[in-house]
Amino acid sequence: MSVYTESPRLNDRSYDLNDQTWHPVGPDFKVTKTRDYTSLELEYSGECLANSINNGYGVRFQIRVDKKNPNYDSQGTLKTGNLKSEISTKSIYVGLPAGEYTVQMFAIAPNSGSSAKGVVLDPGGWGERILVSEM
C-alpha cells in the first residue's frame, strides 16, 4: 500500500540565490511517514522562472527532507539562456524511520561568483505541487 501527499501551492514569492549555497525556495510542508521499511519519493514537474542569472550557467533544484541531501536524486535545472522553463526533479530517501518530516525545494546558482535573482516556482500560479509517495 502506498501513501501519497502533496505540497501546498509553491508560488509564494521570489527568491535571490548567491554565494554558491543551497537556499530554500517555496514554502515548506509536513509529511508523515507511516512505516519504517518504506522509502519516500518526492517529485516536482513544473515551471520555474528567474528574473536574471549572473556569471553562471543556470540554477539547479533539489527537493529535500529536513534540509538533508537525498539518497538518490535527479536535479532539475534552469539554464541561463531560458529564464522560464519546465523543470523536473526527483529525490528518493531510504532508511527514514516512521515520523513527521519537513519537505522543501532547494536551489543553487552553482558556478563560482554566480547569482540568480527573482527565482519563482510555478510563476503562473497554476497550482503545481511537489508530490510525495511513501512506497
Image (cartoon, helix red, strand yellow):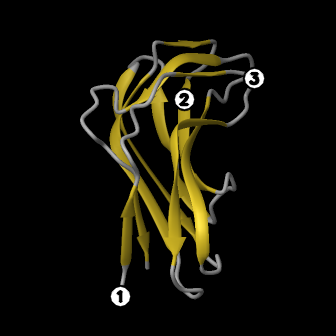
The one nearer the camera, 78 or 117, is 117
Query: Percent from the top left, x then y, of residue 126?
Result: 24, 35
Above-or-below relation of 54 to 10 = above
Query: Percent from the top left, x then y, of residue 51?
Result: 45, 13
Query: Percent from the top left, x then y, of residue 130?
Result: 40, 52
> How many angstroms separate mark 2 from mark 1 (CA)?
36 Å
The residue under the point 54% across, 29% down is: 59
Q: What number is the disc on residue 1?
A: 1
Query: Percent from the top left, x then y, of residue 129?
Result: 35, 48
Q: Earlier in the sequence, mark 2 or mark 3?
A: 3
Give the foreground label among 2 and 1. Answer: 1
Contact flag, marks 3 and 1 (Cβ < 8 Å): no
Which residue does the numbered mark 2 point to in the structure image?
Answer: 59
Which residue does the numbered mark 3 point to in the structure image?
Answer: 19
What kind of residue is marked 2?
Val
The residue under the point 62% across, 27% down is: 109
Q: Residues within 10 Å of mark 3 (few under 14, many from 20)?
A: some
